[in-house]
Amino acid sequence: MNDKRLCYYISDSYDVYTNLALEEYFVRNYDFIDTCLLLVYRNFPSIVLGKNQNFFKEAHLNSFLTSDYHLARRISGGGTVVHDPGNINFAFFEKHDLKNVNSYAWSTMRMTQVLNKLGIGATMNERNAIILDNGKKVSGSAQFSSSLAIMSHFTLLYASDLDKIDDLIQPNKFQITTKASPSVRSSIDNLQNHTTISIDDFIMQSIEILGYDQILKLEKTELKMVEHLRNEKYSSPQFYFDTACSGQLQNHKVTIELEKGHIKRLEGIASENYLNRRLFLTEFDRADAIWQALLHD
């Protein structure tokens, strides 16, 4: 990798759908023959599901619906993460090579080296997460490959609202049966508790230590392609909710069988107005009987 140009791109958007679209645009459209890229971005409050995760298994319904957090889904696997402006996202891109699939030596492992160089003791565990010397987690990693490139990306809790994260990912009271991949919960911490470096300075120092020294600039045509992907895919409830929302929700009031976000069976409530309807988000109404049954268990 040393003989390649090392470029970086810091997104000026805090929109989760735009930044997820940026990731997909890079991994599907750049060949990275002579370049490696580091994308850095932060998001306004958002819950980001892995590609195979069911919202109801991952997020507390009432906490989410009473918050200002957006719901989003990424194209990589791994667990659900909660973003806010205190959470830094790093995405590393390189040319596709089978030997680098499921390898995080050039991304997450290198970030642990950055942290140690900045005086923050950290290691990468067997799940490719960054763990501080106090045993708490500050980062989780995931990967996605196209025919052209590999993207390895991770979150980094720097100054996030940890209480809000715990609130949003607490289990729902109703029972959930699904084949979707569950997240593995860990005790978490913020890097700001272990350094006096500001979040902006941390980003720039990390980029410098990692050796990425050339700024990548996107053409207007490329930005339009990213915007199209954002609008047509990432901001669509059919993508971020329906994709892996199959299975059964049940409590003492209602049983709901879902298939890709659509209601296929309903018990406990007259079903004629609900069957084959999308459960979430366009028809959401707290006064609706089906939502009352779920929210007030």
Image: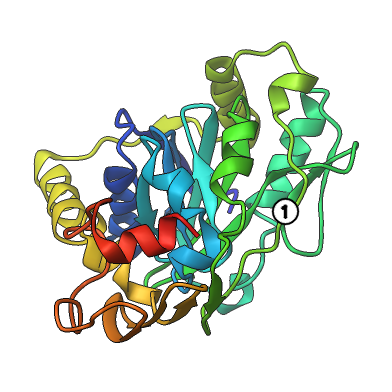
The coloring applied to the image is rainbow
Position in image of residue 232 (x %, y %): 14, 60
Q: Is residue 51 left or right of residue 90?
A: left
Q: How many marks?
A: 1
Residue 56: give x, y in percent of width and height: 47, 65
Question: Does residue 155 sit above or below 294 in this rendering?
Answer: above
Residue shown at the point (46%, 27%) measured from the top left: 85
The amino acid marked with disc number 1 is: Ala
Quarter holding the N terminus is bottom right
Q: Is residue 3 visible?
A: no
Q: Nearer the viewer, residue 67 or 196?
A: 67
> Which residue is pictured at 15% across the width and 53% down the height?
231
| Front in this rendered view, residue 129 or 148 | 129
Q: Quadrant of residue 259?
A: bottom left
Q: Residue at x 41, y 75 (%)?
A: 254
Percent position (x, y) of residue 203? 55, 25
Going by the picture, which residue comes out furthest to the bottom?
265
Q: Secondary structure at mark 1?
A: loop
- The 10 Å Cα crowd at callout 1, few under 14, some 14 to 19, many 20 or more, is many
Quarter occupied by residue 44: top left
Q: Please say whether residue 246 is visible from this viewpoint.
A: yes
Using the image as rendered, state which of residue 192 and residue 280 is in the foreground.
280
Q: Could you tell me residue 261's position as x and y percent?
A: 30, 75
Whether residue 195 sits left or right of residue 203 in the image: it is: right
Q: Is residue 159 above or below residue 217?
A: above
Residue at image point 43% right, 46% down: 64
Label 1 belongs to which residue? Answer: 129
Q: Is residue 252 left or right of residue 162?
A: left
Above or below 23: residue 208: above
